[in-house]
Image (spheres, rainbow, N blue to C red):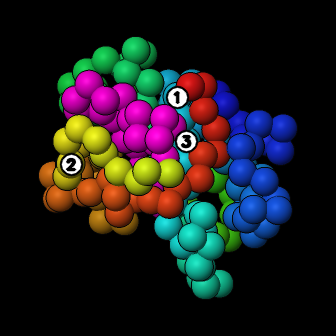
Amino acid sequence: MIHITENILKITKQELPATYDIIVDGNLTFDDRIKMAFISGSRGPSNCYHPKSDIDISLVLDQEMVNNPLQCENDLSEIIGLTVNNWNSSVEIDIALLFAINSCDFECFYTFPDEHGCKLISPDCFGIYKIQKGFDGFVPKIGVDVDKVFPIGMIWSRV
């Protein structure tokens, strides 16, 4: 289990003070099968939130540990459930578990994030698993475009 503390959080209090405090105080925790976590949306680098904004966090699955996510729904539910169940904040968390469905391994998030976007296949270049906000399992291909995810802020990464 990975617990996000001030010592390993990759965003700084100077960059996103309110978001930083929410993450540190909210007991953000995730499964060891996660290899990267990032924040997007209004509490991410765009920093255009209002007081009732939720916090959008995406966890990237380590597919060396879970190599065929489409056939491991129970594992995915357990992985994402750990984060949801440990969250302890008045700010609602909106969590998504992402997994690669091609060979890119999410390079756009950590290799060239300032270039904003998928260099290979988009839209729907990754799979999404959610257990909140009206979803209970795999999110169908709905035209998710990597360009619309940016800007992102890395929270933690093994990469």
Q: CA distance from mark 3 to mark 2?
A: 21 Å
Q: Earlier in the sequence, mark 1 or mark 2?
A: 1
Find residue 75 and report its horizontal and vertical position in percent.
37, 28
Please report the residue visible at 82 percent of the width from the left and 62 percent of the height from the top: 14
Q: Quadrant of residue 150?
A: bottom left
The magenta span reads: 94-113
Find residue 120 and report its horizontal and vertical position in percent.
23, 38
Please report the residue visible at 51 percent of the width from the left and 30 percent of the height from the top: 34
Name the residue beneath numbered marker 2.
122
Q: Does residue 15 belong to the magenta stretch?
A: no
Side of 73 where 3 appears, left or right:
right
| SS at circle 3 | strand
| SS at circle 1 | strand
Please report the residue visible at 23 percent of the width from the left and 32 percent of the height from the top: 101
Name the residue beneath numbered marker 1.
35
Name the residue beneath numbered marker 3.
37
Label for residue 76? Answer: none
- The amino acid marked with disc number 3 is Ala
- The amino acid marked with disc number 1 is Lys
